[in-house]
Image (tube, rainbow, N blue to C red):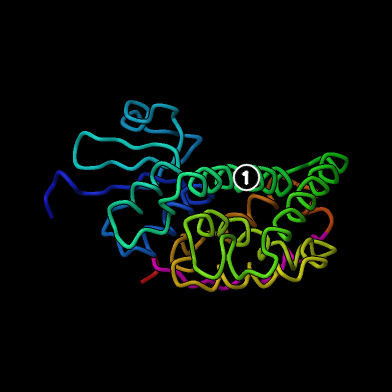
Amino acid sequence: MDKRFKHTLVAFKICPYCMKVLTIMCHKNVKFEIKFIEMHNKPDWFLKISPLEKVPILIIGEEVVLFESAAIMEYIDEITPPKLMSEDPIQKALDRAKFEYSNEIIKSLYQLIFSTEQEKFVKIKEWIIKRLKQMEEWLKDKKYINGNELSLVDLNFVPVFVVLNMLKPILLCDILKDYKRLQNYGDSITSLPCAKTGRVPDYEFLMIDGIKNQNTVLFRSNPCYFNGPKPSHCCFFSK
């Protein structure tokens, strides 16, 4: 491969925004190298090249550094036809707004997962349920967010449903129980090969250990689950 176009992804194993990028890279069969870092111990080389000191970043060749998951996903989509992103200006703007919508849900899900305060936990859960209700409306008479064809918007929502699936055996009630269309949608996008291969093999293990070690509301509500057998996994990175 021409070194000018070599792709190196820098990621954190449980970062949902990194999962987004990995999902489209796997979907588009992009060749890449990956470097994992620990966010509590960021290496100096990373701090020098990451403008916001966040992951993911994509190093292209030896000089170009892309940051922010949405920008990286659009770049990958652009260089690997056929494109998943619409060419229509209005649809493209709506899609980008939904990218941000997915980010807000993901951020709130992680706040829920690692919350140690019951009152905060309940408020965040209520907020998430309202956002999911909106998604249920978007899916009326459609398989995917924009219709019956997969789009870049759908890949942005993959981490949402990976997390919700992980939470099913932990929460006392299923957040999606009143949203049949959303359940079917979540099953559809998480069953995509790229959704299965787009996360590290120990993702669930790391998340569950974090929930347990931080004495979160989730852990206190269901300690038997966390002290039982760990979930199985299947992933690209274990090959």
Q: Which residues are magenta?
A: 222-236
Q: Is residue 227 magenta?
A: yes
User: Residue shown at 75%/43% (left/top)?
Assistant: 115
Query: Residue 201: x and y, percent?
Result: 47, 64
Residue at disc 1, secondary structure: helix
Q: Is residue 60 magenta?
A: no
Identify the residue under disc 1: 101
Query: Residue 37: x and y, percent?
Result: 41, 42
Res. 238 image quadrant: bottom left
The quarter of the rendered structure image containing the N terminus is: bottom left
Residue 125 lies left or right of residue 110; in this view the side is right
Residue 61 lies left or right of residue 107; in this view the side is left
Judge by depth and name the residue closer to the eye, 79 or 111.
79
Res. 178 image quadrant: bottom right
Q: Is residue 164 above or below residue 96?
A: below
Query: Residue 114: x and y, percent?
Result: 70, 45
Res. 72 image quadrant: top left
